[in-house]
Amino acid sequence: MRKILSFIIAMMAFVSTSVIYAENIVLIIKNDGTENGPRSGVPISASMEDGIITTESSTYSGTISVIIKDEDGETVLTTVENVSSNSQFTTNVTSFADGSYTIYYTLDNNTVYYGEFEKN
């Protein structure tokens, strides 16, 4: 029994050190040229891992327009996603050049959330 417990503890230590955590993209609300944020209670959240951005919708259902701009303000990706609450979608940015980017999410009610991320 003691050997089994030691093995389980050793495996738990190995697993906990090999976990890769996603980098969160902090979303800020932007309305009519004004900025408020970061926000708690935002209906969507985003994180990036290995060049894949995962966007989660916690309470929002509807259409989300996604625009990504590079550090020069040039649009490098535009897409539209239909989501329901408690759903998610992914955006692949692995082919993007290294640099700083801004991702914009526009909801049906014209509320815009945006966040910045680094592609390395």
Image (tube, rainbow, N blue to C red):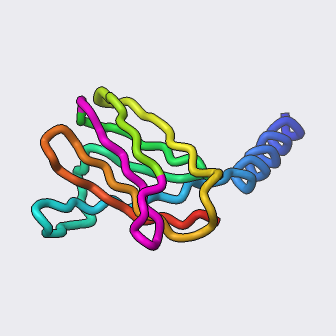
Residue 17 point in image, percent of width and height = 73, 56
In the image: residue 95, left or right of residue 80: right
Name the residue rendered at 51%, 70% in the picture: 100
Q: Relative to the observer, which residue lies in front, 10 or 3? A: 10
- Is most of the magenta stretch helix, strand or loop? strand
Residue 63 lies in the magenta-colored region: yes
Residue 21 point in image, percent of width and height = 60, 54
Residue 112 point in image, percent of width and height = 22, 53
Start and end of the magenta stretch? Answer: 61-76
Which image quarter holds the N terminus? top right
Q: Which residue lies furthest to the bottom in this view?
A: 72
Where residue 118 sits, quadrant-wise, is bottom right
Q: Residue furthest front?
A: 74
Q: Relative to the observer, which residue lies in front, 85 or 62? A: 62
Q: Relative to the observer, which residue lies in front, 26 or 76? A: 76
Name the residue rendered at 30%, 27% in the picture: 84
In the image: residue 9, left or right of residue 85: right
Name the residue rendered at 42%, 57% in the picture: 75
Residue 55 point in image, percent of width and height = 42, 43
Name the residue rendered at 22%, 50% in the picture: 41
Which image quarter holds the C terminus? bottom right
Residue 72 lies in the magenta-colored region: yes
In the image: residue 3, left or right of residue 15: right
